[in-house]
Amino acid sequence: MAEETPQYQELLEYIVKALVDNPNDVKIERRVDEMGVLLSLKVHAQDMGQIVGRQGSTARAIRTLIRIAGLKAHARVNLKIEEPEGGRGPRKSETSLGDLNL
């Protein structure tokens, strides 16, 4: 008997596929443990900016919606957005005084 996909996972898939340019590359894995449900989201590297948004605002909004949908299903749901292979490395810190030509 196949396990039915929870509504909060279907909601996540619907939202993410509507936002990205490469909807066929969207992958969602679901893990359940004593802490609750962890949904791991993988998207195409070029779509990361659309999922994260400015200062993480889009990702924060998606997480909020998924948590609320999870509450309706009596589950504690968290979302992990996986960094794609070859993704952006760590950001450069702000210009230090050593970098200034004084």
Image (cartoon, grey):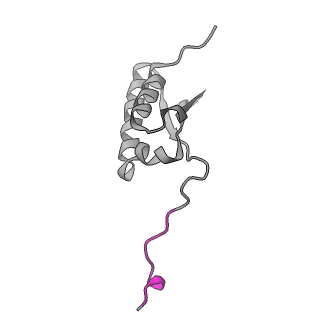
Write the residue at 38% across / 28% down.
68
Residue 18 visible in this rendered orientation of the protein:
yes
Instruction: Identify whether 53 is placed above or below 27.
Output: below
Question: Which portion, as a residue range, is magenta?
Answer: 91-101
Write the residue at 41% across / 42% down.
59
**Residue most extreme to the right:** 1
Q: Position of residue 56 (x, y in %)?
A: 39, 49
Quadrant of the drawing holding the C terminus:
bottom left
Q: Which secondary structure type mostly characterizes the magenta part of the structure? A: loop
Question: Is residue 36 rendered to the left or right of residue 72?
Answer: right
**Callout count:** 0
**Residue most extreme to the top:** 1
Write the residue at 52% across / 39% down.
43
Instruction: Identify whether 100 is placed above or below 44.
Output: below
Q: Position of residue 67 (x, y in %)?
A: 41, 30
Residue 39 visible in this rendered orientation of the protein:
no
Residue placed most toward the observer, 46 or 65 = 46
In the rendered image, residue 94 lying in the magenta stretch gets the answer: yes
Residue placed most toward the observer, 81 or 88 = 88
Residue placed most toward the observer, 71 or 46 = 46
Q: Position of residue 32 (x, y in %)?
A: 59, 27
Q: Position of residue 47 (x, y in %)?
A: 47, 44
Quadrant of the drawing holding the N terminus:
top right
Instruction: Residue 31: name its quadrant.
Output: top right
